[in-house]
Image (cartoon, rainbow, N blue to C red):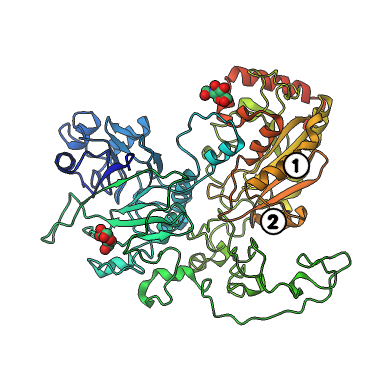
Amino acid sequence: MSSAVKVLVVGSAVGQIRELFAKIKSIDAKHGKFDFALCLGDFFGPPKDASEEYGQEEDIIQLLEGRLEAPMECYIMQGEHPLPAPVIEKFAKTGGALSPNVFLLHKSGVLNTAQGIRIASLGGIYDSNVYTAADSAHGFTSPYFTSQTVEKLLANTMTSSKPQERNYTSLAAIASSTTPSQLVDILISNAWPAGITQFSSAPLPAPELASIGVEPVAEIVRKTKPRYHFAAGGGHPPKFWEREPYVWEEDNARVSRFVSLGAFGGEQPSGKKQRWFYAFSIAPLTPTSEPPPKPANATQNPFLHKALKRPLDSGEDYRWGNNQQPGKRSRTEEPSGKPPAGYKCKICESPEHFITDCPEREKPREGYICRICNEPGHFIRDCPVKNAVGDTGGKKPREGYVCRACGSELHYIQDCPVAKQTGPREGAGRRGPPKPIAPDECWFCLSNPNLAKHLIVSIGSECYVTLPKGQIIPTHQGANHPNAPPVPGGGHVLIVPITHYPTYLAIPPDLAEPIIDETEKYKSALRAMYAKHGAVAVCFEVGRMSAKGGHAHVQVVPVPTKLKNAIEDAFREEGRTHGIEWEEDPDEALRACGGGRGSYFRVDLPDGRKMVHLIREHGPFSIQFGRQVLVSVLGMGDRYDWKACTQSEEEDKEDVQAFKAAFAAFDPSL
Ligand SMILES: *[C@@H]1O[C@H](CO)[C@@H](O)[C@H](O)[C@H]1NC(C)=O
Ligand SMILES: *[C@@H]1O[C@H](CO)[C@@H](O)[C@H](O)[C@H]1NC(C)=O
């Protein structure tokens, strides 16, 4: 445990900043040396009205002006109040540093500390109406977090905020260093997660705490599995409560702990001050870390199991509807008739019966995943939720789907009891993308002022084509690579629908045709252009329904014709080592993902055949997989990390000019 990091966590200061710093200093002297402190909840207390100024001698101003020094590195967050205007201004300027030692975490913040500890923070309070009705992630001027705040937080956990220097010598090294993981070491929030008191026998300091938890925070815990979760908002005034640990068996027996802290500052009406600080050591985990020992007092994991009976007054349970009650349905077997000519049962290959009638299907083969609930171990006909009520029959969404009404990933919005309660909302019948993310947040929306417009090479009526930042094919540096196809400007491009949809298959069917047509036209044009330069085209799409709400696009990469026969093998070979299975019937698999029902990875091989992998919940899939395979085919391991391949805007523009000139004869938009 030589690399263990010592952390001090303190409850809400509520404006008593100088006093808190003094206490932190004396705790550090007695129990330290701590690496950093996490200051939960309300650091500043309620903000003043806009009409009132903060005085020069007030702690806030002294802190912001560097006249009040923190005794160690302190990370602070938003609690239940909006933040004071001068704090927001400073945050806007610096991105977080309020003073040399005090760092304000974003409302949906994820941060890796210098010691290698990953911290996520969710600021603000929960209100069910604001949560579902808000159109954006509220900022620090609002006390609330919204569904977008939570989506953003989960999206932030998918990206590594600390790009490391990498030197790839093997694909295995690439894979292990880029496996996207949403896990965090420490989560801090104001709100409690729903269900946290379940299975615990640690006495609650106040009975009402059993029902203050909220589902969106529970969702964050399920996704990020924090080893420590600290919450500041445990009642008024906040109470101290420490839950027994619980374990995530499937994640290397990861152990989680939850601690609610009392406040340091603010009104303390009842005589005895609640415990307001907590000190602990934590060592960064690596993929090769031994599973931790299971604590003797560990309980069942409250986020994985539902108690059989919940008290009726618990209030929060309505979210779970009837979707999750195993052992209740009656099993009905529909006779399926005889299959059409050419059909073959996938289990025994008999043409005589549908797979559903196969006598050999009592038990699914290893790796079979039920398509209704996405769980292994039973067939669809035996699925415990197959007859569940709800507009989609209780079908469990695929990875990354987030019900926009309640933030749950366990049901589609059509099945959401919250959405039902609030009735049809404005625009509910509207077509098109249900909730475009703000254009300034989307990398691919033309309306985003931050889009790298200088890389665009063609704009059609439905799609545009752009060189990516850091394309695979080297143009300036390393352009003489033996496998670099001589396509002017490199030739690696993205085809992007102008309207924001998360994936191609999520485009509503009646709007999809012109977009798909134009995309195919661009693919054909690129194939023709590459052919002129001795190259074939490999197209791939990561069709991921992510919490982030990505923007559909297809990548097209030229590969020298002499390598064309290596491509399919490379996808299969690399797929095997990464647990990526290719569907036997790609078209059927794509149909199964229609309407945004699922995530998929699609490859168009140079001969026009498709390869499709259905991205499964908890399945291994790196969004860089396509790039990884192609750099291996091209023998360009050093071109794997796009960030390492970016070049100056001047060089980009030269590539764009060269590409446009060569593409002009083929461009369907001209
Ligand atoms: C990367 O690895 C190669 C091959 O092992 C080596 O020659 C090169 O010096 C390394 N580069 C860096 C920056 O470490
Ligand atoms: C669980 O056990 C550990 C180790 O004995 C102890 O420190 C901790 O306080 C216990 N937690 C609860 C909530 O009882």
Q: What element carries label 2?
A: helix
Q: Quadrant of the N terminus?
A: top left
Q: Position of residue 441 (x, y in %)?
A: 52, 39
From the viewer's side, name the closer residue of 47 and 16: 16
Q: In this view, does 203 lie above or below 469?
A: below
Please name the residue shown 20% across and 36% down the image: 54
Q: Which sits in the foreground, 237 or 221? A: 221
Indicate the quadrant of ligand 1 in the picture: top right
- Give the side of residue 447 with respect to residue 283, left or right: right
Q: Please give the label number shown on residue 73.
A: none
* Residue behind mark 1: 569
Disc 1 residue type? Asp
Furthest-left residue in view?
271
Q: Which residue is drawn at 37% across and 76% down?
A: 311
Residue at 28% over, 41% down: 84
Please state if 92 lies on the left or on the right of 669 as rendered. Answer: left
Please identify the quadrant where the C terminus is shown: top right
- Residue at the image position 40 percent from the left and 40 percent from the top: 111
Left or right relative to 471: residue 314: left
Name the image quarter holding residue 456. top right
Is the residue marked by circle 2 packed among few (<14), some (14-19), or many (20+) residues within 10 Å? some
On the image, numbered disc 2 is attached to which residue?
A: 594
Q: Is residue 653 above or below residue 268?
A: above
The percent coordinates of residue 273 (x first, y second) are: 14, 57
Residue 668 seen in the figure: no
Question: What is the three-letter code of the residue carrying label 2?
Answer: Gly
Q: Mark 1: give few (<14), some (14-19) or many (20+) Cα within 10 Å.
A: few
Residues 392 and 297: in front is 297
